[in-house]
Image: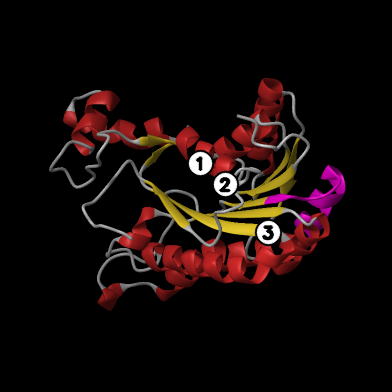
Amino acid sequence: MDFGLKGKHAVVAGGGRGIGKAIARELCREGADVVIASRTLEQLKETAREIEDETGRRVIPLVFDATQRDKVDRMMAEAAEKLGGLHILVNSASLPVGSATAIGPIETVNEDDLMRDFDVKYVGALRCARAAIPFLKKQGWGRIINISGGAARTAGNLSGGARNVSLVHLTKTLSNQLGRYGITVNCIHPGAVRTEGTPALLASRAAQQGISLEELEKRDFAPGSPGANAIGRMVDASEIAYLATFLASDKAWAITGEVMAATGGSGNAVYY
């Protein structure tokens, strides 16, 4: 199927690693040229070389800080200039895995951690969208895809869950504001996702239990376990990328203001 992305131009905020990297790769496979942006230049350069070698498309690394409006605005303007326009924005920037987030009982929650989490994930996505919208309007065709998370649908993480819910609200609000300009806005809830960093994160747990990574995953996602899902395994980042690429495509005009979960069928709640 031709997704109509040949010659399109995209910015993937948080595109140096993880889900953002997988999305950037898939967009390039479909013929788009991509700016990947994050805080770490060396990681961005490595990712850009890897995807360019694989796909033959242009991948431009740009450093930015999602918490600083002037740096977001500057990055987006430079991206549009280098690419020759802008059609797609993917908001995948977040705090690094293992960074402090506001978890635990409310009596001991750290408000600084909570505000930092919101500043990067929610307000960062708002800043990126605000900076990208003039370029999308100029094209008369645009896609904004916000990468949220399954914590939006489960209680427990006082910042991770709440900031993910806030991205859902941002998605719906922007879809209402931008639809008349030919711009759709959608949100994806990943669950537990395998990325290039997953083996290192799980290795110590597997070693402590004296089992392989494959056995650990089978236990973690088996029926009755806390992380159980319908498919019995971790979702791969590439599978999130397939969904994001469809939402970015010319085939997805009828979908806007919506949230799509890609968790492998976790939980028993019914959403309608």
Q: Relative to 47, does residue 93 appear above or below in the rendering? A: below
Q: Can residue 68 be seen at all in this image of the molecule?
A: no
Which label belongs to residue 243?
Answer: 1
Q: How many marks?
A: 3
Mark 1 to mark 3: distance in Å? 18 Å
In the picture, residue 159 is in which quadrant?
bottom left
In what quadrant of the picture does the N terminus appear? top right
- The kind of residue tagged 2 is Leu
Circle 2 Cα neighbour tier, 10 Å, few/some/many (<14 / 14–19 / ≥20):
many
Q: Relative to 58, does residue 69 appear above or below in the rendering? A: below
- The kind of residue tagged 1 is Leu
- The kind of residue tagged 3 is Ile
Q: Residue at x 56, y 41 (%)?
A: 246
Circle 3 Cα neighbour tier, 10 Å, few/some/many (<14 / 14–19 / ≥20):
many
Which residue in the structure is indicated by mark 2?
Answer: 247
Mark 2 to mark 1: distance in Å? 6 Å
Mark 3 to mark 2: distance in Å? 11 Å
Q: Is residue 158 left or right of residue 51?
A: left
x, y percentage for residue 127? 66, 66
| Label 2 with label 1: CB-CB less than 8 Å | yes
Q: Residue at x 36, y 54 (%)?
A: 150
Query: Which residues are the magenta region?
Result: 74-88
Q: Secondary structure at mark 2?
A: helix
Q: Residue at x 25, y 39 (%)?
A: 230
Circle nearer the N terminus (3, 2)? 3
Which residue in the structure is indicated by mark 3?
Answer: 183
